[in-house]
Image (cartoon, rainbow, N blue to C red):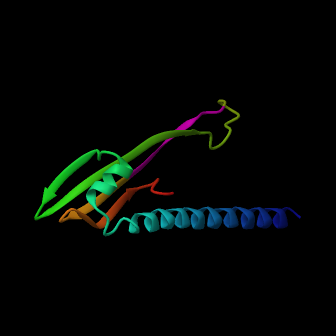
Amino acid sequence: MIKRFAKGRMRTLLLAAICFGVTACVTTHNYEEALNVWKGSSEVSLIKSWGPPADIFNSNGHKFLVYQNSQSTAFEPMKNYSSGSRDYLKALSCTTVFDIVDGHVVEWAIKGNNCRQ
């Protein structure tokens, strides 16, 4: 009986982990698709929509517009009955860089654990 309960619990945890992983990928995929729409758009249109970038740098005829988003979120992963519960902070961030050539978006890049839409 206990083995069956443990096996069922493991199966449930594995399924939850897979679902969470798939959801994270789908969400990042949606963000990437939204960024693809900007390819070919003017730099002016991008700035009007996204606002001023956090940073701008130039290299070999390319202008790079850097947008950053970061936040911290509190969560309580597990109760610790011997010493009480503790909250933990997790840093969430996303840096999006648009590559501009001749005043138009030609490419983009993202980095972080919270690049989703």
Q: Give the range drawn in magenta.
A: 85-94
Residue depicted at 17% across the width and 65% down the height? 102
Q: In this view, does 77 lie to the left or right of 110?
A: right
Residue depicted at 39% across the width and 68% down the height? 36
Q: In this view, does 34 lie to the left or right of 21?
A: left
Q: Position of residue 61 (x, y in %)?
A: 12, 64
Give above or below for 67 relative to 107.
above
Q: Position of residue 19 (x, y in %)?
A: 64, 65
Q: Residue furthest left?
A: 60
Q: Is residue 51 left or right of residue 92?
A: left
Looking at the rendering, which quadrant does residue 107 occupy?
bottom left
Looking at the rendering, which quadrant does residue 101 occupy?
bottom left
Magenta span has 66?
no
Magenta span has 91?
yes
The image quadrant where one finds the N terminus is bottom right
Instruction: Return the residue nearer the eye: 57 or 84.
Output: 57
Instruction: Return the residue nearer the eye: 90 or 25.
Output: 25
Q: Which residue lies furthest to the top in this view?
A: 83
